[in-house]
Image: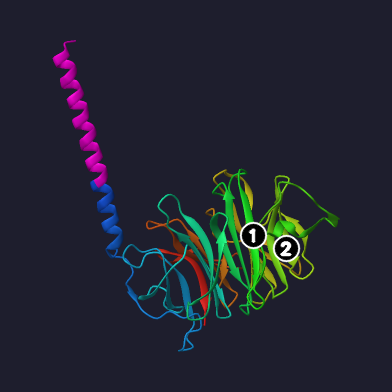
Amino acid sequence: MTTRNRVLILLTALAVLAAVATASVLHAADRAARKDRPQAGGPAVAAGTVALTPASGERKLAFRNMAWGPHRDELATVPATTPGGKRTASGVKCLRFYAAGGTGICLQAVRGAVQDTYRAVVLDAGLHELRHYALAGIPTRARVSPDGRMVAWTVFVSGDSYAGTNFSTRTSILDTRTWRLQPNLESFHILKQGRTHHASDTNFWGVTFADDTHFYATLATGGSTHLVRGDTVTHTVRTLRTNVECPSLSPAGDRLVFKKRVQGRSPDAPWRLYVLDLRTMRETPLAETRSVDDQVVWQADGRTVVYALPGDYGADLWTVPADGTGHARRLMTAALAPAYVG
């Protein structure tokens, strides 16, 4: 091959690389621009006042708005009776969110030049920051006790999915009356089948509060998951049964909805939703047969539950009866991390 041909080939290769780079930059710019434009055919979203105790007394559904546009990732509300209605966006952005009793917990990303960091922000009823705490990893779960006093959150400190085994979590509980933080449930005294348990592979996630002292959560150790009942005063957790993840306590405190690993499913999508009657300890599979990787939320009537599944714009909210009857139906498009407030 002549020197001239080598030069021509080199120039051609450089031109192709330059074209690819230019196309990539233009595609990224176009994608960024589309993210700031309202979603065509999507839900109506407008800036406004969002409160965790609405002045009108009307019950609201608060959530992370996933619709493309200037209000993506902001906390938003709609009337609970018309979830497909116009959304009111708050300007407060959260990756994970929950609220109860006029208190909100917002797990946020703090964008950095080199890498992102994360923090937990405690919000009052008007979404004003009360305090914030640095997080050790990626936010994944958040809960508030019914009266708003106790707050809990879980982050991944390694790995990014509950589906596999290569992950580690850190779960914290905060008392918003005293601002005492229990930074890691792994420091609690664990009673596994009535015996003290110590293991380096211990992980907790998915707290759900019964009251300001007692809670349920998931404990993982030895390759198995366990439902535990915990006490924030004695710093003790006790195992109740196996194969329970991300429990959520019903409004009456008599049932837990949770995700259960089911044999024969894909390793990346292994779960099915069940409800556990805490009086009889009987499990009921729900009519949602798809794998749900979420901590489910109960509607106020205690008859139905709400959860997120992947959607065209990140996630949609679905609902299904809590007694095993009926069928799943889409509640909202482009929404995540719901909480009923007001």
Q: Secondary structure at mark 2?
A: strand
Tag of residue 282: 2
Number of numbered discs present? Answer: 2
The answer to whether any part of residue 293 appears in the image is: no
Pinpoint residue 171: horizontal percent, then vertical percent: 64, 59
Residue 251: quadrant of the picture? bottom right
Name the spot of residue 71 as percent of width and height, x first: 35, 68
Q: Amino acid at mark 1?
A: Thr
From this view, report whether residue 206 is shown above or below residue 261.
below
Mark number displayed over residue 340: none
Residue range highlighted in magenta:
1-25
Residue 17 position (above or below residue 266): above
* Element marked by disc 1: strand
Q: Any magenta on residue 41? A: no
Q: Which residue is mark 1?
A: 171
x and y, in percent, of residue 11 in the image: 17, 26
* Extreme residue toward the front, this view: 113
Identify the residue at the far right of this view. 195
